[in-house]
Amino acid sequence: MGHGEEPLTATYKTQRPPWIGIWSDREYKGRPDWWKEPGLEDSVARSGKLRLYRARFREEDPDWYDPKVKDGESLAGPFGLDSKKTKNLTKKGDQPGELSDFQNKVYEGSHQFKSIAEKFGLSKEHPGLDVSPTMNDLINTPKSQLGRNAIITNSWYHFGPRFFDSPLNEGAFWKGLAAAKYAGILLAPYTILEIRALNTVSVADFSPRAYLKRYLQLAPFPLAVAFAWGFTLSAASTIRNKDDVNNHWFASAAVGSTVATMKSNIALGTSAAIFTAIIGAFWQYQRHSETGLQGMTAHPQSSGIWGGPLLWQKMQIGDADVPTTRY
């Protein structure tokens, strides 16, 4: 949670050991990394994050063979962090703040920018540089392409409110609008599938106008449900001043009530509430995990994603041979 002027941050209560019952009133005050052999520490668990892979002894621990580089001392990882031990912070996940400010931070924090800025005085009119924050691939200017965490990195779906432009306990109304916007984007391809599967618009009558009409007919229900989820999730965080999994119980109840009211079906609303609670809990714990919502930086290793040095043999097509003469 936030302290003073600091923004609210997600919190996670480290899993208790099996000898402390789930419903027990006892408070566990021992090691957060209780599964490890005595004398060993887990930096992920001790930082309050969810450790997915739990090594029991040092020979089973990758960090023992390849220790983490101290924060701020990595020469290859973004922001001086060990990119094999830290989630990819160059992607905008649940970090609160404006996207443009985040992109500028990633751009100016890249190794390429800092190396050039140390040697040359870059003016405000400078068009920008090609940078590689993860030392993996270059990101061309404009830097508005930095930080995007989606399959398609175009900017049109970034218009309007974004869910994590602010901490979870701020701007509940805008959080609801952001969730509704995302639902509206997903509704566009769904409308095409619905028309084709249920034949709600015949082939002879299909046109852009007919598609738009059907889209508007379908829109009220998913947009209302999405708004109820986003607004209630943020409102619960604001009232409780906590960003934890318990906020999702309130959000799922709001979703269930909205579905039951709009569809006049209590059973359907109850099912929607249970489903939303489960998905919300998974989403919340993923935020707390060592990989986060951003995932880890991809590293080419053991031929990795690049295919290896002999991949050209698979691409050799035709009668021409690769030259073997050395100059």
Image: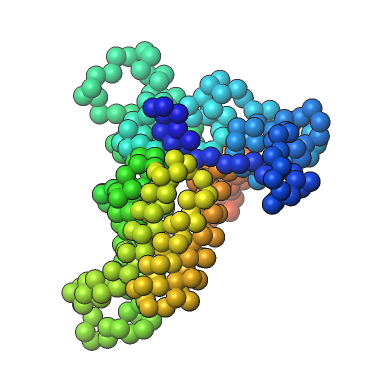
Q: How many marks?
A: 0
Position of 91 with respect to 313 (left or right) is left
Observer able to see residue 146: no
- Give left or right: position of 74 versus 210: right
Residue depicted at 57% across the width and 41% down the height: 12
Instruction: Identify which residue, 198 or 273, lies in the foreground.
Output: 273
Which one is in front, 133 or 29?
29
Name the quarter where the C terminus is drawn.
top right
From this view, report whether residue 9 is shown above or below residue 4.
Answer: below
Name the residue at the front extreme: 25
Residue 229 spot, x, y in % from top left: 39, 58
Could you tell me if residue 163 is visible in this image?
yes
Question: Which residue is located at x 53 percent, y 49 percent?
Answer: 245
Q: Quadrant of residue 211?
A: bottom left
Of all residues, the one furthest to the left in this rendering is 209
Is 320 displayed left or right of 264 in the figure? right
- Asked whether, in this view, residue 107 is left or right of residue 19, the answer is left
Tell me the quarter of the picture where residue 75 sits. top right
The residue shown at (39%, 54%) is 232
Residue 241, position in %: x, y?
A: 44, 40
